[in-house]
Amino acid sequence: MSGLCNEKLIYGNLINGQWVESASGKVITITSPADGSLVGEIQALSKEEVNEVIRYSKESLSLWSSVPIYEKAGILYKAAELLEERAEEISDILMMEIAKDKKSSVSEVKRTADFLRFTADAGKSLEGIAVSGENFPGGSRNKMSYVKRVPLGTVLAISPFNYPINLSASKIGPALIGGNTVILKPATQGAISALHLVKALQDAGLPGGVLQTVTGKGSEIGDYIVTHGGIDFINFTGSTEVGRHLSQISCMTPLLLELGGKDAALVLEDADLEYAARNIVEGAFSYSGQRCTAVKRIITTDEVADRLVDMLKAGIEKLPVGDPRENVVVTPLIDQKSADFAEFLIQDAIAKGAGLIVGNKREGNLIYPTLLDHVTVDMEIAWKEPFSPILPIIRVENMEEAVEIANRSEYGLQSSVFTKDINKAFRIAEKLEVGTVQINNKTERGPDHFPFLGVKASGMGTQGVKYSIEAMTRPKAITINLTE
């Protein structure tokens, strides 16, 4: 197979510079969550083929790590240019493969191009440092350490279904600019979109073996590749359940984990309620809430809750719902299992006394945007990550109770604080056990050069262009001892 796929929409894997099919002939069929139509077929690689991929990766490491950074940067610049040229084509595939609306699909591709350019710029700014021995007590100026950053080796990048272009590039770009070779294992649903990203990077001039792909069933090759001795770093985005499993089996292989969240929006009495409501609706329901940083609960007091509910209801009722090809915001969830879970959370809350304000309607795997009021801590929706368009409101007596409930979650990705009082905002922000606090803004990822991290069950390690490069490289010190 000379190209990415053939006329039958059978996609190959990029292995040592060539797009090839599995020797077994086994494929996995990808159908659209939007209408069940065929998107394409991807390869189901065997363990033996995984071994081959890792061998090629190791063989390519010394060559790639010796390529000057400005040349590596040039390839990323070219890949960004190709992505923008192909934005319409790739966004159409995104739209059908993961049911992401057209506007968000185009935005993901263009944002990824920007990410690659910024990564190239950051890579060119990497510099070594010189440390003098005389700075430490008893030291000597005759001793000096030259410290530079070197690649870790072969990076296994495991990307999720919801941002298969952007969250693949956020792993691949920093790893490559740091001199590593990369093996991408995309989520099965989303793999075709990710393969188009890889094709752009290949066409931009990446040497064979530097970036390769592995598609297949996690039950057959997932644990095998993660525990393979040839993997030097694992960069994973996905569920907390899988993240915990990876951390248990990966032994001494370093990890960067971006996991789930239960991001809370704390709305204070003095907040601009109209602004907060608009902002929260966007943060909770774009791409049907299938984002780790989606606003997943509101915590506020009775003093403002009734007015806020009315504003939220008005905003939610205006959200266009349906087929991703029809300029909508809320689209079908990725699969029936996800829709079943969303329906369970809604029914559990209503059965336990939550007030249904709007929503609670289902058509196949399409869940209509749902707002639940008077949610209490004994309801599953108060704690579970829905990954669907469900927004619960938890009423509290004061902000001390709000912070306590926010922090009681097993997750710690982000939180929002809406208030006009910057002093209150900072005091509350200091108490929230999360990686990032957004003041007067929805929880969200980016800008991509900001640090992005989760605590507790929301992740391990820090992302963001500079931080990701640092995570996938290490310091190497060369000490010079001058003689008299």
Image (cartoon, helix red, strand yellow):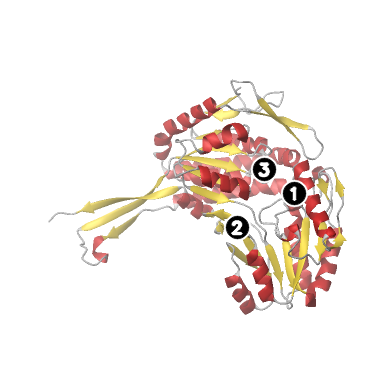
Nearest to N terminus: mark 1 or mark 3: 1
Q: Residue 30, how many percent across, how many down? A: 72, 33
Q: Residue 51, how many percent across, how many down? A: 49, 28
Q: Residue 131, how many percent across, how many down? A: 30, 59
Nearest to N terminus: mark 3 or mark 2: 3
Q: Quadrant of the C terminus?
A: bottom left
**For the residues carrying marks 1 and 3, which lies nearer the camera in this image?**
3
Residue highlighted by disc 3: 161
Q: Secondary structure at mark 1?
A: helix
Residue appearing at x 83%, y 45% in the figure: 326
Asked if one can make out residue 73 in the rendered structure from this viewpoint, the answer is no
Mark 1 neighbour density, 10 Å: few (under 14) some (14–19) many (20 or more): some
Q: Quadrant of the N terminus?
A: top right
Check the image and report above or below for 104 versus 218.
below
Task: Name the residue type under label 1.
Answer: Lys
Residue appearing at x 75%, y 49% in the figure: 103
The quadrant where residue 100 appears = top right
Check the image and report above or below for 32 versus 349.
above
Residue appearing at x 46%, y 29% in the figure: 55
Counting labels gives 3
**Left or right: where does residue 465 sit relative to residue 29?**
left
Disc number at residue 447? 2
Q: Secondary structure at mark 3?
A: loop
Task: Name the residue type under label 2.
Answer: Pro
Residue highlighted by disc 1: 103
Camera-nearest residue between 352 and 369: 352
Label 1 to label 3, Cα distance in Å? 17 Å
Label 3 to label 2, Cα distance in Å? 21 Å
